Image (cartoon, helix red, strand yellow):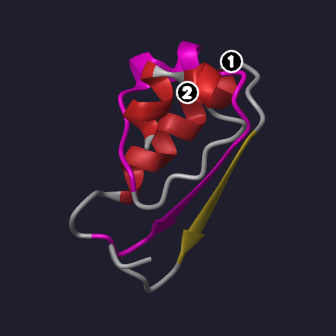
Amino acid sequence: AWQLAAENPERFAALAPVCGGGDVSWAPRLKDLPTWAFHGRDDDIVPVERSVEMIEALRALGSPVRLTVYEGVGHAS
């Protein structure tokens, strides 16, 4: 989800990645896209830190973002 939106931000009204990890270098391309990310704290496939890093990078650019982390939930969020 992160990569698809970063490659084509004009195609989306908003972004809602679930248990996704992105590349923080994409943040400038995503900064104007409202984003609400979701991640399970106990995800052993994609670490929750990957979502946290993306959200922090977007917040640093003033992006309208949210992150919901589900405690006790793995990758099957």
Vertical comparison of 72 with 20: above or below: below
* Label 1 to label 2: alpha-carbon separation: 7 Å
User: Residue reaching furthest bottom?
Assistant: 72
Say which mark, if any, is on residue 25: none
Residue at image coords 39%, 52%: 20
Amino acid type, mark 1: Leu
Res 76 quadrant in image: bottom left
Residue 22 position in % (x across, y down)? 37, 36
- For the N terminus, the quadrant is top left
> Is 38 inside the magenta-drawn segment?
yes
Would you call the spot at circle 1 few (<14 residues within 10 Å), some (14-19), or many (20 or more)?
A: some
Res 12 quadrant in image: top right
Amino acid type, mark 2: Ala
Residue at image coords 59%, 52%: 16
Magenta-tinted stretch:
20-43
Front in this rendered view, residue 28 or 11: 11
Residue that carries the numbered disc 2 in the rendered image:
57
User: Residue reaching furthest left?
Assistant: 45
Residue 59 position in % (x across, y down)? 68, 30
Element at label 1: loop
Residue at image coords 55%, 15%: 29
Residue 71 position in % (x across, y down)? 51, 80
- For the C terminus, the quadrant is bottom left
Front in this rendered view, residue 69 or 64: 64
> Is 23 inside the magenta-drawn segment?
yes
Element at label 2: helix
Residue that carries the numbered disc 1 in the rendered image:
61
Res 32 quadrant in image: top right
Residue 74 position in % (x across, y down)? 35, 78
Q: Are marks 1 and 2 in contact (CB under 8 Å)?
A: yes
